[in-house]
Image: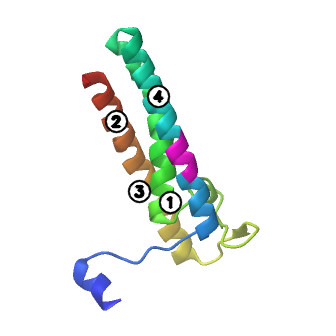
Amino acid sequence: MASEMQSGTAAVCPNISLSERRRRLGFGVVTLVLGVAVLVTLMAAGVNRWWRLPLLVLFYPAAVGYFQYADHTCVALAARDQRKTADRAERIEDAAELARVKAQARSVQRKSLLAGVALMVVALLV
């Protein structure tokens, strides 16, 4: 806790278990690989660069999967005021914890959108 205070970061308030985090990371990796495969196919086919814009549809969910894993936060569960730390989802009753989880979910969405757009821009430039 002292090191968290010194570094200026707060502890994560997880709303998903390790197994749920791994599922989201797996989804992110598969979606990213699929996006890169589509990019390589488009490049090999010599298709106009602007056809790479829809890759955002793959890169954004890939980033969501990664950031949900990294931030211990499921955006969908947070929207339903829930956590899934065991086999089933349960309602988050504590108002402070719920506010923290919702803030983390918004952060996941922001970071994912920025990462997805950044990946799409790189895809346009290569």
The colour mode here is rainbow
Judge whether residue 45 is colored magenta.
no
Count of labels shown? Answer: 4
Sequence-first tag of 3 and 4: 4
The type of residue carrying mark 2 is Leu
- Which label is found at residue 69? 1
Q: Which residues fall within the magenta stretch?
A: 26-30
The type of residue carrying mark 1 is Tyr
Sequence-first tag of 3 and 1: 1
Quadrant where the N terminus sits is bottom left
Distance Cα–Cα, label 4 vs label 2: 13 Å
Residue carrying label 4: 37
Sequence-first tag of 2 and 1: 1
Q: Nearer the viewer, residue 97 or 33?
A: 33
Mark in front: 1 vs 4: 4
SS class of the residue under badge 1?
helix
Quadrant assignment, res 41: top left
Sequence-first tag of 1 and 4: 4
Q: Nearer the viewer, residue 87 or 96?
A: 87
The residue under the point 47% across, 53% down is 66
The type of residue carrying mark 4 is Ala
Measured along the vertical axis of the image, is residue 111 above or below residue 40? Answer: below
Residue carrying label 2: 119
SS class of the residue under badge 4?
helix
- Which label is found at residue 107? 3
Specify whether residue 16 is in view: no
Quadrant assignment, res 78: bottom right
Mark in front: 2 vs 3: 2
